[in-house]
Amino acid sequence: MSLNTIIGRRLLSPAITSMAMAAMLGVGVHFAPPANAQAAAQSVDPNAGETKEHRDARMKWFREARFGMFIHWGVYAVPAGTYDGKQYGGGGEWLMNMAKIPVATYAEYAKQFNPQQFDADRWVSVAKAAGMKYIVITAKHHDGFAMFHTAVDNFNIYDATPFKRDPIAELAAACKKQGIKFGVYYSQAQDWHHAGGAAYGGHWDKAQDGDLHEYVQKVAAPQLKELLTTYHPTVLWWDTAVEMTPEDIKALTAAFADDPGLIANNRLGNGVPGDTETPEQHIPPTGYPGRDWETCMTINDTWGYKTFDTNFKSTEMLLHNLIDIASKGGNYLLNVGPTDKGIIPQPEVDRLMQIGDWLKVNGKSIYATTPSPFKKLPFDGRCTHKGDTLYLHVFSWPANGSGIKLAGLNTPVRDARTLDGGQKLAVTKEADGSLTIAKPDKIDPMATVIEVRLKGALDVNSTTPPIAPGADGKYTLLPADSDVTGSLQVESHDGVDNFGYWTDASSTIVWPVKATAAQAGDYQVQIEYACPPDTAGSAFSISANGQSADGTTEDTGDWQKYRATLLTGKLALTAGANTITVKAQTMPHGAVMNLRSVTLIPVAK
């Protein structure tokens, strides 16, 4: 299951004992808050009872934006990943925690933080030229250093540094002037500077000791009120949730009433769902159907600036990520990590400008689009949709020089043309009902966009194609080929998909399979799954044609430690169409398992 997959920074348990460090190192960790905690927090959800009409109006710009800039900038840019002569892995913004730097020692970095080359208008111009529609900057990260002029204490960029300016105010003004939405990130519970703030792994300095409730009431809540009422952000990006009292949640969200248009993410925790799902450093294979979501990702390997991290992703990879995310109905929040001088590293700017050049020509295929109506595409690329138009993003063309095929479209096509240059392309209907769209003369090396205009309302055959056995006679049933109901989501770790979020006992997984007369017969069932010790014990069944193979989840060690297990019982496939259904029978501990695959193994006749 994965209520919040932690890769970089994420949801923490009350004692913060198992999550954020694994996250910081890029390890997926999963946590399900108790059902009673979720129910209690609903009473303090600032958007509880909101009508669909109001929510749709509030989220409209976000759903159309598709592309935003994340900025991780703070006093951690001074050490830039190095402490006491040692270079540290992980995110540069986590240096204080990783190196266990004393509070007073870390605070000295503020005296060296003087980013005289910071230019808010320049930063916003970069975002705008990249085709980004909004900016979210770290107003306070886990190190407790405020990047705005707060009256709460003097550990902020105005009072504690030689800079004596307020970058949050300057960026808010620059965004307003240039027509970009402005947002702030705020670490509401984890704070390694202020007494009482939470810290992964526990405090390492007595100066950190104190009461979390007092910290929230005296530091976090007042600073949030300052941010919301002074700078008027459109987006509030919480981070690393810790279980708090209802009074704490109410204090943190008290200023929401002053701005009914505010969008806040899902990381406040405590059962408050928030407005957006926030997968980090990965793209969920199926997105989040029915939910607004946003993948946040680094351009290199760090969020906060590190002098020695030059492992920058290629422009092609970043652009393909944007297209992939848009095709699944999400937004791409792409991070830059400015230096202590106030400069966005040039390799990051270069990549953003190249993406912007592509969007100037092809942006209509990304902005204000809806997800692909196709479960699968028979070519290397993605699809987005808007009104009576499909946008086909072709990453690579067949080696034989032919065009691409499109299957499952029932609506007649009016015409097809390239967005870049407007070349009209021949569309041929094949005997099997699929379409072939001719290859254009001009090919974009990163992604060629074909605009396909329809003659009527979109009608797509969305039936999942039946699965055939492999050459070894086995059926391999994978998440991408299934239909699911309930809470289940398809997620991806290390490039391998799995079913997660299995917190609803009524959820089902269904695969259609086909068998010839020779393939009909009995099959053993093997699953590959993961389950931590505190969730083991769920009973489940895999059924077809009135027969079932049953099992009970056991402790595999962790949500990402998978085990192959042969189930008790067999399934009988008949010649023709068959339906394989997976369902939980009992779920005693709030979740079932992470499921990677089901394999049907033929029994020798």
Image: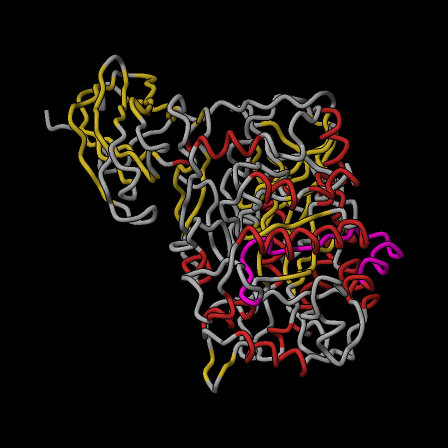
User: Is 103 or 473 nearer to us in this picture?
Assistant: 103
Q: Is residue 403 visible?
A: no
**In the image: residue 154, left or right of residue 407:** right
Residue shown at the point (64%, 64%) measured from the top left: 72
Residue 25 included in the magenta stretch of the image: no
Establish if 341 lies above or below 322. Answer: below
**In the image: residue 408, left or right of residue 169:** left
Q: How is the image coloured?
A: secondary structure
Residue 423 falls in image quadrant: top right
Residue 434 falls in image quadrant: top right
State which region is magenta. 171-193
Residue 349 falls in image quadrant: bottom right
User: Is 226 or 475 nearer to us in this picture?
Assistant: 226
**In the image: residue 184, left or right of residue 34:** right
> In which quadrant will I find the C terminus?
top left
The x and y percentages for residue 172 are 81, 58
Q: Which residue is most to the bottom?
A: 85
The x and y percentages for residue 509 are 38, 26
User: Is 411 or 553 nearer to us in this picture?
Assistant: 553
User: Is 499 or 524 nearer to us in this picture?
Assistant: 499
Residue 179 included in the magenta stretch of the image: yes
Residue shown at the point (51%, 35%) measured from the top left: 376
The x and y percentages for residue 532 are 29, 44
